[in-house]
Image (cartoon, helix red, strand yellow):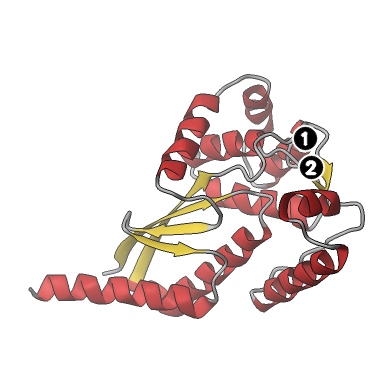
Amino acid sequence: MAVPIKIDIVSDVSCPWCIIGYRALDMALNNVGDQVKADIHWQPFELNPNMPVEGQELREHIQEKYGATAEQSVAARQMIVDRGAEVGFDFNFQEGARIYNTFDAHRLLYWAEAQGRQTELKLAFFNLYFCEAGNPSSHQDLCKAVKEVGLDADEALATLQSDRYSTEVRELQQRYRSMNITAVPAFILNDKYLINGGQPVEVFETAINNLLNEKNNNAVN
């Protein structure tokens, strides 16, 4: 019988390391096979909660936020592209790319969880931003992604045009910040084990195997 493992992934749709980390996790789960049944929940985290609607040019943002030079920014972007390729994700960074507010995307992800399509929508949002150079604060772009995964785009638009799920998303964000999670991705396994960052496949596979061993040892005792 497969061992259930609850995995909370605290992340933002504009975080490249979040999709890298998820793809590595997914590969680790595939390697472990039917020994485990993963119950994945995406939890909200805004990297830039005060970002205006129009967003900001990405290079300018990185320079202001992290003090990175143009050369450092280029090198960091290449590292992300290389790591993405290792886990089968093709980043399509473009000149003039912008960073956007992602609060509305998190509201739709909260809604999608009740529909049983949260992971599909999260991956569509990653694809929207990192592969299609889309805008994850645009209601039109968000609803297009919603439709692509088979969810109701009209209901999604109605949600976006209201303040539905705003309180819930903010409360979840505060909850994880109160747990001293200040950067993403953060993977929380069974509410007790934390893995920070876009780690390699081996790190996730080791953690999963440790949980399996723990479960087996408890069963013996």
Position of residue 135 measured from the top left corner of the image (x, y, whole percent): 79, 42
When the figure is inspected, residue 33 is found, relative to residue 99, above or below; the finding is below
Give the vertical position of 69 relative to 53 (above or below). Answer: below
Left or right of 27? Residue 127 is right
Is there a contact, CB below 8 Å, between mark 2 and mark 1?
yes
Residue at coordinates 61% horizontally, 42% vertically from top-left?
46
Which of 195/210 is in front? Answer: 195
Q: Residue at x 47, y 29 (%)?
A: 168
Q: Nearer the viewer, residue 44 or 122?
A: 44
For disc 1, the marked residue is 138
Q: Is residue 152 above or below residue 71?
A: above
Residue type for callout 1? Ser
**Which of the pair 208/77 is nearer the observer?**
77
Left or right position of 205 against 218: right
Q: Quadrant of the N terminus?
A: bottom left
Numbered circles on residues, count: 2
The residue pinned by badge 2 equals 135
